Image (tube, rainbow, N blue to C red):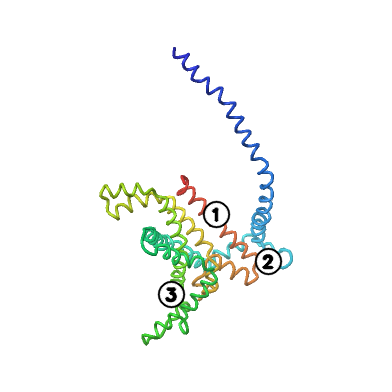
Amino acid sequence: MSQTSSVADAAPAVTRSPSIARAKRSQIRGKLPVLVLFLPPALLLFTVFVILPMGEAAWYSFYNWNGYGLPDQWIGTRNYELIFNNGAFRQALINNGLIILISILVQIPLALWLATMVTHRIKGAVAFRLLFFLPYVLADVAAGMIWRFVYDGQFGLVAGIFNSFGMDAPFWLADRQVAFYAVLGVIVWKYFGFHMMLFVAGLQAIDKNVLEAADIDGATGWQKFFRVTLPLLGSTVRLSVFFAVVGSLQLFDMIMPLTGGGPSNATQTMVTFLYTFGVMRMQVGFGSAVGVVLFIICVTLAFSYKRVFMKND
């Protein structure tokens, strides 16, 4: 009896498997024209503008080359030795680490708090969202130029505030001990709106019935946030941290008009270091080595983070 039933149970699976295989083959054939039409141009563009430049940069990093003619002075790993023996590069690494730390500990919590505020049905919530998101829409170069004027100790907003109290205005961007903290303030102001909008989208996707059930169970505001809202925002928080880390490693456009990496390389990031010591000084081989190091750091952090924290997202 059991053998008969087992054969009967297995029969539908046997009869269904050819139809499933045919459906998969027809699905692949249906996508084939799209793949043939769009995949080769995309691969060609990716190869020409991404893969080949990366390979050339890795090759040039082993030469002492100023960018003119063909590289012919092979120096092996000398450029990489110069990078890690350079105090300005070590300062740039520290600065990038501090930017990541401030982004995670200050910028993202601020964005999450503001997102919870503007998501509630309060008067003017849409206007507040627009106001907080506006700095992110502003171009990085324009933001750097604006804040350079704000921080100016002679004609800027800071000078006006201090002078109104009868005090001499400080020149924060010219002070090696203070300049980078001034830059960190601008970074938080510039990018928290982007993370806020991510959290607004995540909060709007939460089922209201879950929050109402928490209210019925007598949960306080903090309990509802930490035990209901925050766990449901887990994937959004991980994505926001990922963007903060990758964006912090690539920070360039705002630093150059704001401080140019100064004073005394106090505000250099890895990308501004590459531009200052590689491009501006016509040391293309050295700059290529910096680019390779930056690429390795970015790829390692990105894939490690996705593998450890975002593997289920």
**Mark 2, residues whose alpha carbon is within 10 Å: few (<14), some, or many (≥20)?**
many
Total numbered labels placed on residues in the image = 3
- Label 1: which residue? 299
Q: Earlier in the sequence, mark 1 or mark 2?
A: 2
Q: Position of residue 208 (x, y in %)?
A: 36, 49
Residue furthest toward the left?
Answer: 218
Residue 245: image location, x then y, percent: 48, 58
Task: Report which residue position mark 3 lands on.
Answer: 178
- Quarter of the image where one finds residue 67: bottom right
Q: Earlier in the sequence, mark 1 or mark 3?
A: 3
Q: Label 2 near label 3: C-beta < 8 Å?
A: no
Q: Is residue 130 above or below residue 4?
A: below
Q: Earlier in the sequence, mark 3 or mark 2?
A: 2
Identify which residue is drawn at 61% across, 65% down. Answer: 287
Residue found at x 43% / y 80%: 158
Three-letter amino acid code at disc 1? Val
Q: Amino acid at mark 3?
A: Val
x then y, percent, for residue 27: 61, 36
Would you call the spot at circle 1 few (<14 residues within 10 Å), some (14-19), or many (20 or more)?
Answer: few
Q: Residue extending furthest right? A: 69
Q: Which mark is residue 65?
A: 2
Q: Work out how far the residue at label 1 is from the one at label 2, CA to CA, in angstroms.
A: 26 Å
